[in-house]
Amino acid sequence: MTSFARRAERVQPSAIREFLALAGTPGITSFAGGYPDASLFPMDELRGIYDGLLTAGDGSALQYTASEGLPALRALVAERLTADGMPCTADDVLITQGGQQGLDLVAKLFVDAGDVIVTERPTFLGALIAFNPCEPRYRSVPMDDGGMDVDALEQVLRTTERVKIVYTVPDFQNPTGRTMGLARRRRLVELAEEYDVVVLEDSPYRELRYEGERLPTIKSLDTTGRVIHLGSFSKILAPGLRLGWALAEPEVREKLALLKLAADTQNGTLNMRAAAAYLAQFDVEAHIARMLPTYRHQRDLMLETMAEHFPAGITWTRAEGGLFTWVTFPEGLDLAAFQRDVLIPRAGVIVVPGAPFFAEAPESHHARMSYSGVPDDRMIAGVRAMGALLTEALA
């Protein structure tokens, strides 16, 4: 057997993938995946766009295009980012295979084996999966309802050598649903400058705010080019398009584009043409606005049902947007074991146990629960069944 490279030791199966494999099983109610609600996809508009692209009498929609991404799409993304307080042009934007590829490319660009990536505690599991092949060390910073504790971050930066990246999901964080406050965003940029580190701002849920005040992006507060901003069409159009973007200062964007060229040459031209056509022909902001009441209703229904049926001693976050709540159980309850032995076989309910979301010192008494896309009756029944089993387990 050929010996694998050392980095392959850090490539491990995703805990989410294991549970998502069960999601389509009859009788299973899934609160596990971070899937947007498929009923909200703009199906009629996209069907018309694809029909036009494939019956126009030429094959340009199926041809190669620029590795950085279709120029028209990059320009349209740049317009939206500029309107969101991040002045830029198409030349500053790289189109990626969803936000996930942005995480992979940034880690490859900046991280050598043994370098340190600072994450929130807990953090997005998909980011750890992307970072791990680069063989980093991790330091994690606690969170509260105001997001990353920047005082704790300062302590980490002051006492830790070889920090390259501070990674954050500032808007409706995956997995907790928390949002970083404005003062902390400003302080994060100051600390990045003081300690010469890159801030990787991962914000795929930013558009899904259904209450509260919209905050400036961290990138909009950046004056020296230290912040790389990642975004995605997955939550505002459809994840199957596999389209995201990275906004970075010119030298960084160019190097990211070269790494993308090595990885996959380019995104699919057809999907990029379709996304560009959608942005040009339809009002994407109106489309997003139409989605928000559905997500707000789904969040409220899940949290109200948990409040009614979960036993005392369990807490959860109340996100102002996004798709998730983070549930904390008494410390003696191992959610992975509870799910395997009780929750799935007796209730047919799946969540994502929290331990894999910790870059270091994992805690087993949490779970990420997504309220997106579950019909009301199944959500109520699933949460009620979960509450009954928790009451029994914690008695």
Image (cartoon, helix red, strand yellow):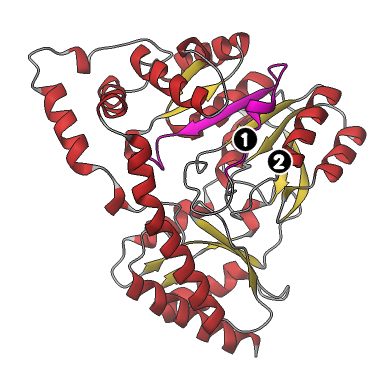
Amino acid type at image mark 2: Leu
- Disc number placed over residue 216 in the picture, else none: 1
Q: Position of residue 353 (x, y in %)?
A: 58, 62
Amino acid type at image mark 1: Pro
Q: Position of residue 165 (x, y in %)?
A: 72, 29
Quadrant in which the C terminus appears: bottom right
Q: Position of residue 151 (x, y in %)?
A: 86, 43
Q: Is residue 391 above or below residue 45?
A: below
Q: Is residue 165 above or below residue 264?
A: below
Residue 225 located within the stretch drawn in magenta: yes
**Most distant residue in the right direction:** 159
Mark 1 or mark 2: which comes first in sequence? 2
Overall secondary structure of the magenta stretch? Answer: loop
Q: Which quarter of the figure has residue 31?
A: bottom left
Q: What's the magenta region? A: 214-237
Counting the numbered discs, the total is 2
- Disc number placed over residue 125 in the picture, else none: none
Residue at left offset 71%, top offset 23%: 112
Please, what secondary structure does the residue beneath circle 2 have?
helix
Left or right: 86 as drawn, with respect to 192: left
Please, what secondary structure does the residue beneath circle 1 have?
loop
Q: Which quarter of the figure has residue 275?
A: top left
Q: Is residue 191 above or below residue 324?
A: above
- Disc number placed over residue 182 in the picture, else none: 2
Q: Is the Cβ of the residue at disc 1 closer than 8 Å to that at disc 2? A: yes
Residue at left offset 72%, top offset 51%: 146
Residue at left offset 58%, top offset 28%: 229
> As rendered, which of 28 and 51 lies closer to the eye?
51
Q: Is residue 156 above or below residue 349?
A: above
